[in-house]
Image: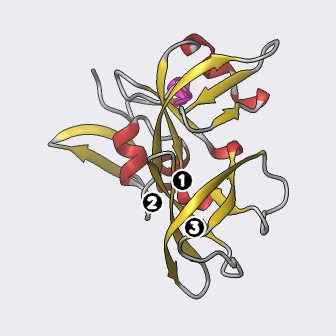
Amino acid sequence: TRIVVLNAGRLQQIDSPFNLYHNPYNVFVAGFIGSPSMNFFDAKLLPGEGEALIVDTGVFQINVPPSRAEPYRSHVGKEVILGVRPEDIHDANYLPPGITPARIEANVEVIEQMGHEMIIYLEEGGKNFIARTDPRTQSTVGSRMGVVMNLDNMHVFDRDTELSLAYDYKNENMSHATT
């Protein structure tokens, strides 16, 4: 099965549902696939110690996992967009095993109890974002909550073009928009 994603009549990407979700060509595709949609943070890509890279949103900083850093090196010092899906933001008390974590604190604004999960609307430093968490989460509206982003699934996009910096161009087979 392949899906065609269009934006205002322009082809964005043709791919399997799995690849659209895990390897979006651009910000539009990343935000179109998934519900709730991907969280986007304006950021700057900074050099860390040695070969390390840091994504700085102005509110929080995260260290890019070494295994994910190579596609981003050409954008050190540049403005980027960090993308993290709600299902990759977890209650710090209920982490799935084997993830590459980045912990931040945020204010809980709204909680939607869904039974098998909770959708939590968070705010930190004027940035709003959504987490899809374990239903055992004990946070309440108005409280501070420790959340952990799974950096194994982070996305970074060029600020100007909105193209993914890690898109697998060598396997594209004309599966995205032409510029």
Q: Give 67 or 62, whichever is nearer the viewer.
A: 62
Q: Secondary structure at mark 3?
A: strand
Q: Secondary structure at mark 2?
A: loop
Which numbered dot is residue 85?
1
Which callout, 1 or 2, points at the residue further toward the start of the chain? 2
The spot of residue 136 in percent (x, y) is 71, 81
Could you tell me if the residues under marks 1 and 3 are in contact, i.e. CB atoms within 8 Å? yes
Q: Which residue is mark 3?
A: 132
Q: Which residue is mark 2?
A: 34
- Give the residue drawn at x 58%, y 88%: 115
**Front position among marks 1 and 2:** 1
- The amino acid type of the residue labelled 1 equals Arg
How many other residues sit within 10 Å of disc 3, few (<14), some (14-19) or many (≥20)?
many
In the rendered view, tell whether residue 17 sits above or below residue 57.
Answer: below
Q: Secondary structure at mark 1?
A: loop
Residue extending farthest front:
142
Q: CA distance from mark 1 to mark 2?
A: 8 Å
- The amino acid type of the residue labelled 2 equals Gly
Specify the segment rendered in magenta: 166-170
Residue extending farthest left:
9
Query: Which quadrant holds residue 89?
Result: bottom right
Q: Is residue 167 rendered magenta in the image?
A: yes
Q: Give 114 or 59, whichever is nearer the viewer.
A: 59
- The amino acid type of the residue labelled 3 equals Arg
State how the image is colored: secondary structure
> In the rendered view of the protein, which quadrant contains the N terminus?
bottom left
- Give the residue drawn at x 31%, y 49%: 4
Q: Give 18 or 2, whichever is nearer the viewer.
A: 18
In the rendered view, tell whether residue 59 sits above or below residue 148.
Answer: above
The spot of residue 97 in percent (x, y) is 84, 60
